[in-house]
């Protein structure tokens, strides 16, 4: 094997490793998405068994986080990537932290569902909660799609959706507070719902973070802590 | 300059760079600690001016996060660190995310303080809230000390404190719910306090995360997602 083909061999192995990491992030993302969906079903149907399942599944997400981190640090040590390869690894390291925390938030919803399942049923604003859950699930899916295709426009769209989610969240919170004021006997149960709504809002924030890492990977620009308008400008400027 | 001294020169420059990153993490940590203290003062004294100041200072923490991330990715690209140097950079990348989020939580407390300052004063359980704030500030300080000295025993101690914080948090939450039930006119105000208590509990979680990265750096072992007992065993096993 001459030197060039040896180098190509190394480089194609390296590409395979990077591709493998990307695939595993997508797999972790898929699990996380499913956890949000299942936790929401548990909440809507007050299904304690489903809630329990969500909490049991959380370990898979944690395991993936640990193993992807190991793989990234192995790649950094052995392959010493630079430029866009390095940015990919960097984006992965950040992304999996947010995915793991989305998993935690789904776990919180499941725990609340279990608690609510043991109480008297209330119907007040569960439709709106379900709607918020669909919105943030969509954000997570879109953030992962943006990651898979490394598409900055799609990433920016996730950040845009976060504004709607925040508005929806505020409205739901006000509604919950009104319920509690009108009938203080509901306070315990409504507090459980408030924690679910809060968890959903946090999931939206984490999806937004992931979309920001996509922009960092593609453009090499750090748009965290920028306003949406400033971020849009950064991206269109090339 | 012969080859050896050239290599030494490179290596001492590299050490200086690593030391600089460490120093900047400590500086970021110092700012974050101050934000918790100031946000708590704003909350206890219902001082809207102080609360405003906390929110204005948040950008400094965000800036540090962005610039430390830039420095880490520069070090990875140019120095291609391995072994414990790589683990340090890895621990820094993870740590600053948690520090930035502690800053966000302090910002939330400050916003609640501003909201409460415009309302009728309540005294119910503010002493307990202050106590919780002192506990989590101590956790953050201890986690940063553990980071500065790369001390796994100190790190493990932070994880131990998190249990007390969680207990305190649960008790405070129950107290808040009792207040709301006894006097539903307080619901709006008590909800503000609940968000502060929640933010403090989250700060404790982030401090615990930081202490886990210290263990990762020193021992090369990932103790996230382990029980406290399992983590203790991992560490003492060398």
Image: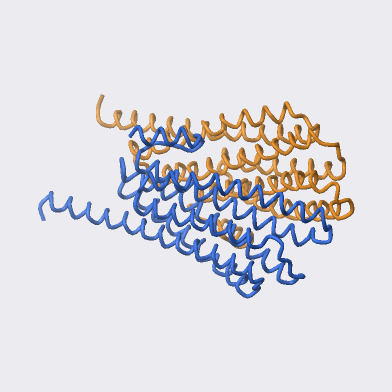
Chain colours: A blue, B orange
In the picture as drawn, the residue positioned furthest to the bottom comes out as A49
Name the side, left or right, on which A193 lies relative to A101.
right
Q: Quadrant of the N terminus of chain B?
A: top left
Above/below status of A210 relative to B51: below
Res B182 → quadrant:
bottom right
Q: Nearer the viewer, residue A156 or B29?
A: A156
Residue B108 is situated, as x and y percent measured from the top left of the image, at 67, 40
Q: Is residue B238 visible?
A: no
Q: Nearer the viewer, residue A233 or B28?
A: A233
In the picture as drawn, the residue positioned furthest to the left comes out as A2
Q: Nearer the viewer, residue B111 or A165?
A: A165
Q: Residue at x 66, y 30 (%)?
A: B54
Residue A202 is situated, as x and y percent measured from the top left of the image, at 59, 50
Residue B150 is situated, as x and y percent measured from the top left of the image, at 55, 43
Residue B98 is situated, as x and y percent measured from the top left of the image, at 56, 44
Above/below status of A173 relative to A185: above
Q: Is residue A196 visible?
A: yes
């Amino acid at each position: 094997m001459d030197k060039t083909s040896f180098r190509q061999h190394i480089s194609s192995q390296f590409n395979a490793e990077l591709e493998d990491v990307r695939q595993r992030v997508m797999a972790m993302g898929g699990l996380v998405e499913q956890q949000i969906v299942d936790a929401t079903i548990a909440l809507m149907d007050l299904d304690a068994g489903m809630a329990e399942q969500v909490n049991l599944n959380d370990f898979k997400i944690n395991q993936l986080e640990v193993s992807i981190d190991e793989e990234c640090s192995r790649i950094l040590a052995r392959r010493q990537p630079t430029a866009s390869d390095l940015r990919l690894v960097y984006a992965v390291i950040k992304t999996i932290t947010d995915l793991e925390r989305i998993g935690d938030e789904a776990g919180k919803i499941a725990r609340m569902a279990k608690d609510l399942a043991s109480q008297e049923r209330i119907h007040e604003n569960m439709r709106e909660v379900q709607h918020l859950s669909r919105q943030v699930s969509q954000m997570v899916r879109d953030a992962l799609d943006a990651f898979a295709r490394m598409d900055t426009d799609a990433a920016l769209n996730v950040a845009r959706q976060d504004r709607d989610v925040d508005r929806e969240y505020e409205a739901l919170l006000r509604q919950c507070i009104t319920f509690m004021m009108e009938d203080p006997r509901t306070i315990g149960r409504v507090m459980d719902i408030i924690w679910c709504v809060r968890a959903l809002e946090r999931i939206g924030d984490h999806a937004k973070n992931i979309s920001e890492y996509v922009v960092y990977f593609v453009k090499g620009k750090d748009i965290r802590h920028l306003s949406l308008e400033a971020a849009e400008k950064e991206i269109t400027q090339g």
